[in-house]
């Protein structure tokens, strides 16, 4: 049966950004009319999860192509849904087309300041619902790395709020695959990590390094243990290692190129825990066919640590059969690298093929899960005929 325009539901996916105090004031306190237009200034590091959703999961493109443009947008059709996406340093909240009755907000809840701005977006959306300008709202939430997201709880429909679906980054006991779904952290698009298309050389060329680790060494962390193991065994000479003592939010062109080269030229990518077990490095390594060696330990906070979620941490990745190497203690790393030395190029090629195919399938399944969940909740069920 042919789809009518009414059945084509247009989702405006707003990337929630780290607004300045002035912008938050202008949008939510100074405004007297819902329909007024405001300019909102943003910071790039908050765009990561939204751009990963649009570009890497939904395979969407943005116009203009210039990443520094003030306003970028795109649209695509998935199943029976038309998606529209808006992002950029200038955002126009509340300015929806007539047919845009359903919205997905991509919010940042990693720390108190960002939570404050996120709740103001939610209050704005609630105003639009009360004014009958919106019918349905879903949220993709970059949650707390310590999995403390209680501030979001009252906004869920099950608790009397208006948010019907929540796609939540990081393990959480809230996940039930009914109205709360676990969502991947993805790659650091805010640091300009690109979409990577596998090619022949990526797949079949011999890689000069057994492993890589480029990252920050936090005091009294397992990362210090990792470095001690590598140096004690002399394995740091066989791996691409570049560490720093303080985290840096931005990449230069040279540092990004160096990081990509490290992934491309290493058979394994070492992924020690930070504040949370899940990190961008896991997905970035998959993009280049470098097998993640993931430290499989729980970090502080209620990150799915219950008998009902025995597969945590990284419950989503494990449930989808991620072909990673999971490690409980970095003391076991030398044995893993010794095995790497004995593997033939053909064996490594087959493993890369498996990893790249898994990652492609992983993103396809997430796209299907995201679209189907929205359609089941937001679009009326009609008989085909």
Image (spheres, helix red, strand yellow):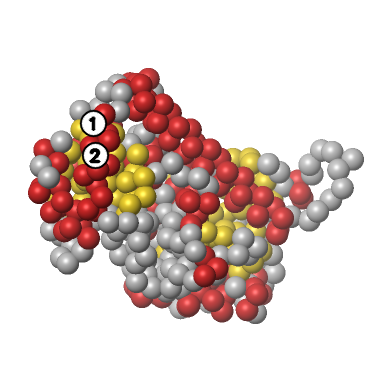
Q: Quadrant of residue 239?
A: top left
Helix, strand or loop status at disc 2 = helix
Image side of residue 133 versus residue 307, left or right: right
Query: Is 91 or 331 nearer to us in this picture?
Result: 331
Image side of residue 327 versus residue 162, left or right: left
Residue 165 seen in the figure? no
- Residue at left 57%, top 60%? 181
Residue 173: give x, y in percent of width and height: 52, 70
Residue lying at the far right of the rendered structure? 385
Query: Is 39 or 325 nearer to us in this picture?
Result: 325
Helix, strand or loop status at disc 1 = helix
Q: Quadrant of residue 42?
A: bottom left
197 lies above or below 160: above
Q: Which residue corresponds to mark 1?
A: 341
Instruction: Give the CA separation, mark 1 to mark 2.
Output: 6 Å
Residue 171: give x, y in percent of width and height: 46, 63
- Residue at left 54%, top 54%? 13
Label 1: how many Cα within 10 Å (few below 14, some 14–19, many 20+): few
Q: Which residue corresponds to mark 2?
A: 337
Q: Quadrant of residue 64?
A: top left
70 lies above or below 148: above
The answer to the question of whether label 1 and label 2 lie on touching residues, with beta carbons closer than 8 A, is yes
From the image, which quarter does the C terminus lie in?
Answer: top right
Image side of residue 195 versus residue 369, left or right: left
Image side of residue 245 versus residue 53, left or right: left
- Residue at left 70%, top 58%? 378
Residue 1: give x, y in percent of width and height: 84, 38
Residue 328 seen in the figure? yes
């Amino acid at each position: 049966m042919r789809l009518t325009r009414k059945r084509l539901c247009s989702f405006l996916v707003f990337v929630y950004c780290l607004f300045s105090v002035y912008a938050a004031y202008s949008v939510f306190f100074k405004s007297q009319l819902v329909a007024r237009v405001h300019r909102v200034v943003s910071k790039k590091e908050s765009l990561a999860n939204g751009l990963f959703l649009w570009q890497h999961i939904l395979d969407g493109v943005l116009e203009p192509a210039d990443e520094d443009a003030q306003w970028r947008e795109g649209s695509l059709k998935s199943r029976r849904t038309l998606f529209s996406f808006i992002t950029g340093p200038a955002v126009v909240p509340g300015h929806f087309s007539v047919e845009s009755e359903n919205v997905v907000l991509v919010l940042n809840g990693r720390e108190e300041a960002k939570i404050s701005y996120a709740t103001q977006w939610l209050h704005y959306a609630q105003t639009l619902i009360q004014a009958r300008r919106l019918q349905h709202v879903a949220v993709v939430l970059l949650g707390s790395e310590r999995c403390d997201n209680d501030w979001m709880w009252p906004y869920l429909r099950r608790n009397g709020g208006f948010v019907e679906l929540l796609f939540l980054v990081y393990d959480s006991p809230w996940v039930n695959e009914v109205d709360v779904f676990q969502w991947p952290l993805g790659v650091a698009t805010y640091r300009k990590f690109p979409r990577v298309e596998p090619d022949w050389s990526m797949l079949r060329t011999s890689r000069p390094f057994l492993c890589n680790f480029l990252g920050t060494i936090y005091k009294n962390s397992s990362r210090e243990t990792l470095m001690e193991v590598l140096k004690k065994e002399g394995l740091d000479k066989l791996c691409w290692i570049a560490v720093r003592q303080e985290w840096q939010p931005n990449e230069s062109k040279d540092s990004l190129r160096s990081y990509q080269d490290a992934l491309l030229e290493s058979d394994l990518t070492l992924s020690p825990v930070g504040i949370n077990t899940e990190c961008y490095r896991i997905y970035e390594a998959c993009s280049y066919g470098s097998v993640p060696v993931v430290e499989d330990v729980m970090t502080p906070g209620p990150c799915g640590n219950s008998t009902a979620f025995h597969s945590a941490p990284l419950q989503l990745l494990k449930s989808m059969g991620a072909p990673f190497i999971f490690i409980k203690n970095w003391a076991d790393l030398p044995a893993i690298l010794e095995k790497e030395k004995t593997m033939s190029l053909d064996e490594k090629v087959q493993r890369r093929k498996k990893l790249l195919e898994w990652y492609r399938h992983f993103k396809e399944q997430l796209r299907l899960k995201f679209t189907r969940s929205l359609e089941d909740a937001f679009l009326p069920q009609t008989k085909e005929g």
